[in-house]
Amino acid sequence: MDGTGNVWIADGGNNRIVQVNQSQAAALAFASTAVGSTSSDSPQTVAVQNIGNAPLVFSALAATTNFNLNGSNTTCDGTTSLNAGTSCDLGVEFLPTVVGTPLSGTINLTDNSLNAVAPNNVQTISLSGTGTGTAPPPPTPSVAVSFSAATVTVSAPGASGTDTITLTPSGGYAGTVTLACSGLPSEATCSFNPMSVTFTAASSAAQTVALTVTTTAATAVLRPYAPFDSQSKGSLPMLATAFWLPGLLAAGAGLRKRKSGKSGVTSQARHMLILLILLAGVGMMTACGGNGGSTGGGGGTTPNAGTPKGTTPVTVTVTGTGSLSTSATFTLAVQ
């Protein structure tokens, strides 16, 4: 046996040496096939045999562009081994993606044949076929949007909810995209981390973005003591009138008693008269100026109903280079 696995046998009767070529891999040719279709003679089967006395260990198994390994007809596994004296099959298909004559390719089987160690031997199966018809247009570059959870739940108004957005490029998309929310209920906002994502043509790996939805709790109006509130501005003047009119009469009676020569009444009447005048003044100021407190709430705050409870569909729109615009919708549930 030589270094490539060919077996040589000495034929003494005929005075010659005969080569038994055991390492020559098969070559497959496929029928002409329309672009985007599978050839009529697919799959074609290649048997891989271990004719040695030790396990044949596979480390890789792959087909090049325009060809494919059919899962139903392929029993070889690129990560396992083939025991001595056993075999497995490769089911090969021709699926042309371009028009051309001929389209060539290979299936590369990496293993430890001939007791090879790293780097292992690579056995190659040659493939060929012809693509016919009109080639389909190239795919439109785009980015798909998906959510890890279809519903973002917020425990109560004033709390926040989170989700993870996955952005997956296709068609060779390259550029920077930004995200935005629409359809949010009142007093709710959304934010993204990161705010933008950049894809390159050399990589089609998906990227993730953290989404946070923030809601607002309801707030109440703070009002001052009721007698000074604009909504009850008439109560104090009425109360003052109810007291100062009788009080003036009583004070007048006290003054008359002073003229008749009785002591002690004069001081009480004076004090009562001053108190009633003050009460009447406060009542009139409240009555005249009460209307000015209605806009500002008398020094209080404007009420805020907050984010309403319930479910709302919210749309995340992704825009980017090359007029890209795509979107997906999740449900916001405020409990």
Image (spheres, grey):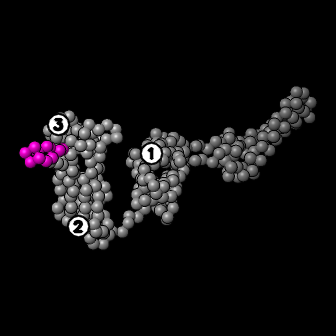
Q: Which residue has dot 2 on it?
A: 33
Instruction: State which tag comes first along the sequence, 3 or 2.
Output: 2
The x, y position of residue 170, in whole percent, is 40, 57
Quadrant containing the N terminus in the rendered view:
top left
Q: Are marks 2 and 1 in contact (CB under 8 Å)?
A: no
Q: Label 1: state its secondary structure.
A: strand
Q: Nearer the viewer, residue 121 or 314?
A: 121
Separation of disc 2 and disc 1 at Cα?
43 Å
What amino acid does circle 3 point to? Ala
- 193 vs 131, left or right, is right
- Residue 213 place in picture, x, y as percent: 50, 46
Instruction: Looking at the picture, tell me which residue is in the foreground, 253 or 282.
Output: 282
Mark 2 lies on a secondary structure that is strand
Badge 3 local density, few (<14 within 10 Å), some, or many (20+)? some
Q: Residues within 10 Å of mark 1 (few under 14, many from 20)?
A: some
Which residue sits at x=72%, y=52%? Answer: 292
Task: For mark 3, give the secondary structure.
Answer: loop
Q: Which residue does the numbered mark 1 point to in the structure image?
A: 164
Q: Are marks 3 and 2 in contact (CB under 8 Å)?
A: no
Between disc 3 and disc 2, the foreground one is 3
What's the amino acid at mark 1?
Answer: Thr
Residue type at tag 2: Thr
Camera-side residue of 95 and 141: 95
Left or right for 17, reference 330: left
Q: Residue furthest left?
A: 13
Q: Which residues are magenta?
A: 7-17
- The one of 149 and 321 positioned closer to us in this rendering: 321
Q: Which residue is mark 3?
A: 84
Q: CA distance from mark 1 to mark 3?
A: 50 Å
Membership of 81 in magenta stretch:
no
